[in-house]
C-alpha cells in the first residue's frame, strides 16, 4: 500500500521533471515574447507587451529568411519525397543479393555529417558549372538550388525510411490483381500503390519540410544570397538578440499545437463516425455541445485555444503598455542615479584615502574607474559580461556602465548598446 | 450453355534456376469445364496457374488460350482473371469499386460501373453492401466479392488459387456448392487449384493430380478416386490401405498379388497399368477403408479373406473408423457406416475382413504420398 503510493508519487515527480525538461524552455521562451524588457527574460517582469510581434513583423531579414525557408522547404519536400519513394520502390525490386548493399548506400547520407554534405554539394556543383561553362553559373550557383539539392541528399534518405516501412506492409498481390484485371502498369501504380502510400507520403512530406526548415549545418555552406530563417537567426545571435525571436518561437509553437490538435480532433471525429456507422446508430449531439465536440477533448481544447488567441489579437489592438513602460523606465533611472551617486561617493572616499596615504603614481591606477567599479557593481562581472543584469537593459543607462564589462565571455555581443546599434538600421 | 474457351498446355516446362517446378505438362482443358489441379503444397500447381495468367513465362512449351499462343502477352492482356489465395481485394476501395476495377481502368463512367456493380452484388447475394469497405465484410462475403470482381472483367477463363483455404469448414462447404453453381450459370472455364481433394472431387469435371512438378493423372473425379493411375494418386486422393508384393498371376483385367505379409490378394488392374504388369513384378494393391467389411460366420467362396485384430475404434459421426492389425503387424483401416448401432468390432476382437476384388486396384510399385 505504502510502497505503491511512493511509487506513484515518484512516477508523478518523474513525469513533472521530464515534461518540465522537455517543455520548460519552450514555455519560458514563449513568455519572454510578452515581456517588454529588451533582452529575452521573464525575471524581472517589466511590462506585458505585444511590441515584439511588431518588431518581428517589421524585421525584413527575418521575414525574408522565413520566405526563403518556405521556398527551400517546398523544393526539398518535392525532391526528397520523390527521390525517397523511387529509392524505396527500387529496394523492393532490386536483386535480393544486392539489397543490403543498396540499402547501406542509400542510408549513408544520414550518417555523413551535414557539414560535409554542405561542402561537398558546394564543391561538386561548382565543378559542374565550371565544366558546363559560365552560362550555367547563374543557375548552378543559385543559393536556393544548391540548398535544396544539399538538403535533399540526406532528407531523401529519411523519406525513404518512411516509405520502406510502409511498403513492407504492401501486398504485391494487389498490384498483380490490378494487372490481372486489365490495368496497365501505370494504372496499377497510380490506383493501387500510390493510394496505399498516401499516408506515408504525407508524413514523409511533413518530416522533410521540418528537417529542411530547421537545417543549419548543410545550409550554411550553400545558401548563397538566400539566407534561410535558421541562418538569419544565427547571424542575429552574433549581433545580439531581442524578444522578437521569442515572438517568432511563440508563433511556431502555437502553429504546432494547433496543427496537432486539429489532426487529433479530426482523427477522433472520423473514428467516432466510423464506430457509429458500424453500430448503425447515428451520432448523438451532447446536451450542451454539438456532436463534433462531444467526447472529443482535442476539439474542445482546439476551440478554447482559438478563443484565447483571438482574444489576444483583439486586445493587442487596443492594449498600450506605454504607461507601465514609462513607470519601469523611471524606476530604472532612479536606480541608476542612485548607483551613480553611490559610486561617486566611493570614489570620493578612495581619493581622500589615497591623498592621505601619500601614494602618488601607483595610486592613480587604483583609482581608475574600471577597477574600482568592479566591487561596486558585481553584476557586471558575471560570465555573460553582465548581459542579464536588469540594469543593463535600461537603454538610457549612463554611458559609463558598458565600459566596465568588455571582458565578458561573449565579448559583450549581448550588450544593450550593441543591440541599439542593430535596431537602428 | 455456350461453349467456353479452352486452355491447352503443350510440353510446358517451368524452371527456377536448377529447380524444375513444372515438368513437361500436357493438359487439354475443354471450354466451359471446371478443371482442378490437385496436389500437395509445393507440387507446382500454383506455378502452372501463374503461367496461364501471364505472371510467369514458361521455360519451354506453350500456353494456349482459345487456341491462341499466349507467349509475350502480359497478364493484363489475357482473357483470364485470377482469384488470389488471399483474395487481394483492394483495401482502400469500397466493395463496388473493387468489383468494377476492371471497368475503371478501361475508362467506364461511374454510373455504368455502379449499375454493373449492383448486378453483380445481386448475383453474389450482397445487395446493398457496395459501399462497405472489404475490411467490414466476413470471410465468405470477401470471397464472393473477389469472385464478382473477377467475373466483372468478363474473362474467358477464371483461375482460382486455393480461394477457399482460409475459410472455416462450414463456409468452405457452402462456397464449394456456390462456386459450382456460379460456374454453371456463367458457363466459362474455371481452373481451380487446391490441395484439398474434397474440393477437387465435389466441384470438378476433370481433375489433374500433380506430384513434384509432374502430372500423374488427369481424369474425372470418379476415375481419379476409383482407378488411380499411380500409387501416389491412390494414396493422395482419399484414404487407402496399401499392400505390397509381387504379381503372382494375371487373369484378364485382374491380377493375383503375392503380398509380403497378408498372403494372396486379388484386385483389378488399374486401366493405366494394363499391359505393363507382368508376373513377378513388384506391385502395390490398394483397397479403400470403405471397401472393406467384416464377414459373418460363412465366408463367400469367391472373396479373399484377411484375418485381423481390432486395435482401436474411432467414432466419426457418419461412420466408424476401425484400426486393425493384420498378419505380421500390417496396419489396416476399415470404415463402417454408422447405422445407429454399435459395430461388432469391439477392441481386441478378431475379425475376418473381405472386399470385392472389383473395388481394389493393383499397379506397379511406386512412390506414395507422404503422410
Image (cartoon, rainbow, N blue to C red):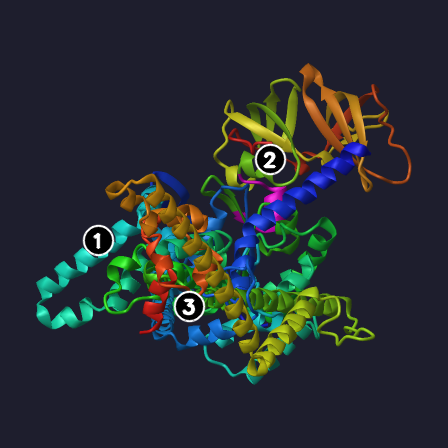
Q: Is residue B48 above or below residue B99?
A: above
Say whether residue A127 is left or right of residue B20: left
The residues colored magenta run: B218-229
A102 within the magenta span:
no
Query: Residue B324, how many percent across, how many down?
Result: 75, 24
Q: In whole angstroms, how far apart are the C-alphas of marks 2 and 3? A: 105 Å
Task: Say which chain tag 2 marks.
Answer: B
Q: Residue furthest top?
A: B328
Camera-near label (1 vs 3) is: 3
Q: In whole angstroms, how far apart are the C-alphas of marks 1 and 2? A: 70 Å
Q: Is residue A342 above or below residue A72?
A: above
Please rate how many residues cluster around mark 3, counting C-alpha atoms within 10 Å: few if below 14, some from 14 to 19, many from 20: some
Q: Is residue B312 above or below residue A332?
A: above
Please rate how many residues cluster around mark 2, counting C-alpha atoms within 10 Å: few if below 14, some from 14 to 19, many from 20: many
Query: Residue B194, how many percent across, how many down?
Result: 57, 49
Residue at (68% x, 63% y) in the render = B137
Camera-near label (1 vs 2) is: 1
Q: Are marks 1 and 2 on the same chain?
A: no
Asked if the residues shown at circle 2 and circle 3 are in contact, with their CB atoms under 8 angstroms apart, the answer is no
Whether residue B290 is visible to the viewer of this picture, yes or no, is no
Q: To which residue does mark 1 refer?
A: A120
Asked if the residues shown at circle 1 and circle 3 are in contact, with their CB atoms under 8 angstroms apart, the answer is no
Q: Residue furthest right?
A: B341
Task: Say which chain tag 1 marks.
Answer: A
Q: To which residue does mark 2 refer?
A: B235
Q: Find numbered disc 2 in the image and state the secondary structure of the residue it sits on.
A: helix
Query: Residue A314, how many percent across, how many down?
Result: 60, 81
Residue at (66% x, 47% y) in the render = B198
In front here: B287 or A153? A153
Amino acid at each position: 500500500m505504502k510502497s505503491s503510493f511512493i511509487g506513484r508519487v515518484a512516477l508523478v515527480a518523474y513525469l513533472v521533471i521530464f515534461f518540465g525538461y522537455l517543455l520548460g524552455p519552450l514555455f519560458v521562451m514563449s513568455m519572454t515574447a510578452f515581456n517588454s524588457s529588451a533582452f529575452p527574460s521573464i525575471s524581472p517582469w517589466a511590462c506585458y507587451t505585444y511590441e515584439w510581434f511588431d518588431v518581428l513583423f517589421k524585421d525584413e531579414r527575418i521575414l525574408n529568411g522565413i520566405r526563403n525557408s518556405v521556398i527551400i522547404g517546398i523544393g526539398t519536400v518535392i525532391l526528397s519525397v520523390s527521390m525517397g519513394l523511387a529509392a524505396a520502390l527500387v529496394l523492393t525490386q532490386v536483386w535480393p543479393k544486392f539489397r543490403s548493399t543498396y540499402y547501406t548506400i542509400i542510408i549513408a547520407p544520414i550518417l555523413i555529417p551535414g557539414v560535409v554534405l554542405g561542402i561537398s554539394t558546394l564543391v561538386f556543383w561548382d565543378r559542374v558549372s565550371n565544366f558546363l561553362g559560365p552560362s550555367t553559373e547563374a543557375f548552378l550557383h543559385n543559393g536556393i538550388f544548391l540548398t535544396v539539392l544539399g538538403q535533399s541528399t540526406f532528407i531523401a534518405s529519411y523519406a525513404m525510411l518512411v516509405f520502406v516501412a510502409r511498403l513492407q506492409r504492401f501486398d504485391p498481390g494487389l498490384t498483380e490483381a490490378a494487372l490481372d484485371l486489365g490495368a496497365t502498369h501505370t494504372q496499377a501504380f497510380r490506383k493501387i500503390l500510390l493510394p496505399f502510400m498516401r499516408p506515408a507520403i504525407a508524413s514523409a512530406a511533413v518530416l522533410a519540410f521540418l528537417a529542411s526548415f530547421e537545417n543549419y549545418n548543410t545550409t550554411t555552406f550553400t545558401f548563397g544570397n538566400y539566407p534561410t530563417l535558421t541562418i538569419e537567426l544565427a547571424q542575429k545571435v552574433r549581433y545580439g538578440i531581442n524578444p522578437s525571436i521569442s515572438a517568432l518561437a511563440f508563433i511556431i509553437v502555437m502553429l504546432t499545437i494547433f496543427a496537432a490538435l486539429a489532426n487529433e480532433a479530426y482523427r477522433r471525429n472520423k473514428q467516432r463516425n466510423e464506430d457509429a456507422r458500424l453500430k448503425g446508430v447515428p451520432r448523438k449531439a451532447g446536451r450542451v455541445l454539438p456532436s463534433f465536440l462531444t467526447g472529443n477533448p482535442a476539439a474542445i481544447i482546439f476551440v478554447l485555444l482559438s478563443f484565447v488567441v483571438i482574444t489576444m489579437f483583439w486586445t493587442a489592438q487596443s492594449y498600450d503598455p506605454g504607461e507601465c513602460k514609462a513607470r519601469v523606465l523611471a524606476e530604472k533611472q532612479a536606480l541608476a542615479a542612485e548607483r551613480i551617486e553611490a559610486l561617486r561617493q566611493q570614489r570620493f572616499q578612495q581619493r581622500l584615502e589615497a591623498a592621505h596615504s601619500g601614494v602618488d603614481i601607483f595610486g592613480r591606477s587604483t583609482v581608475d574607474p574600471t577597477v574600482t567599479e568592479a566591487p561596486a557593481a558585481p553584476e557586471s562581472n558575471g560570465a555573460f559580461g553582465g548581459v542579464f543584469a536588469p540594469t543593463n537593459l535600461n537603454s538610457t543607462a549612463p554611458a559609463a556602465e558598458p565600459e566596465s564589462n568588455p571582458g565578458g565571455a561573449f565579448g559583450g555581443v549581448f550588450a544593450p548598446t550593441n543591440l541599439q546599434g542593430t535596431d537602428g538600421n | 450453355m455456350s461453349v467456353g474457351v479452352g486452355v491447352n498446355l503443350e510440353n510446358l516446362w517451368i524452371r527456377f534456376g536448377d529447380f524444375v517446378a513444372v515438368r513437361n505438362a500436357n493438359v487439354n482443358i475443354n471450354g466451359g469445364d471446371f478443371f482442378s489441379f490437385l496436389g500437395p503444397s509445393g507440387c507446382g500447381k500454383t506455378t502452372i496457374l501463374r503461367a496461364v495468367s501471364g505472371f510467369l513465362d514458361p521455360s519451354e512449351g506453350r500456353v494456349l488460350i482459345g487456341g491462341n499462343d499466349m507467349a509475350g502477352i502480359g497478364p493484363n492482356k489475357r482473357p483470364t482473371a485470377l482469384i488470389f489465395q488471399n483474395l487481394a481485394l483492394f483495401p482502400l476501395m469500397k466493395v463496388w469499386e473493387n468489383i468494377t476495377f476492371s471497368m475503371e481502368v478501361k475508362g467506364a463512367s461511374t454510373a455504368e460501373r455502379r449499375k454493373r456493380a449492383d448486378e453483380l452484388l445481386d448475383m453474389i447475394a450482397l445487395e446493398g453492401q457496395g459501399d462497405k469497405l472489404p475490411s467490414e465484410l466476413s470471410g465468405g462475403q470477401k470471397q464472393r466479392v473477389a469472385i464478382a470482381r473477377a467475373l466483372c472483367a468478363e474473362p474467358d477463363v477464371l483461375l482460382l488459387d486455393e480461394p477457399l483455404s482460409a475459410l472455416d469448414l462450414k463456409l468452405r462447404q457452402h462456397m464449394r456448392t456456390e462456386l459450382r453453381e456460379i460456374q454453371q450459370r456463367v458457363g466459362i472455364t474455371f481452373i481451380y487449384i487446391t490441395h484439398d481433394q474434397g474440393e477437387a472431387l465435389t466441384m470438378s469435371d476433370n481433375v489433374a493430380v500433380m506430384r513434384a512438378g509432374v502430372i500423374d493423372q488427369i481424369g474425372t473425379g470418379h476415375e481419379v478416386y476409383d482407378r488411380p493411375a499411380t500409387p501416389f494418386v491412390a494414396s493422395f486422393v482419399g484414404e487407402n490401405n496399401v499392400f505390397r508384393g509381387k504379381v503372382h498371376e494375371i487373369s484378364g483385367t485382374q491380377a493375383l498379388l503375392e503380398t509380403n505379409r497378408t498372403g494372396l490378394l486379388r484386385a483389378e488392374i488399374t486401366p493405366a497399368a494394363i499391359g505393363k504388369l507382368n508376373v513377378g513384378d513388384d506391385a502395390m494393391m490398394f483397397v479403400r477403408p470403405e471397401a472393406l467389411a467384416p464377414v459373418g460366420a460363412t465366408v463367400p467362396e469367391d472373396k479373399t479373406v484377411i484375418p485381423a485384430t481390432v486395435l482401436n475404434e474411432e467414432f466419426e459421426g457418419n461412420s466408424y473408423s476401425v484400426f486393425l492389425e493384420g498378419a505380421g503387424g500390417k496396419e489396416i483401416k476399415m470404415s463402417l457406416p454408422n447405422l445407429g448401432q454399435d459395430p461388432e468390432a469391439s477392441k481386441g476382437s478378431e475379425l475376418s475382413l473381405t472386399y470385392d476384388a472389383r473395388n481394389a486396384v493393383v499397379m506397379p510399385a511406386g512412390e506414395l504420398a507422404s503422410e
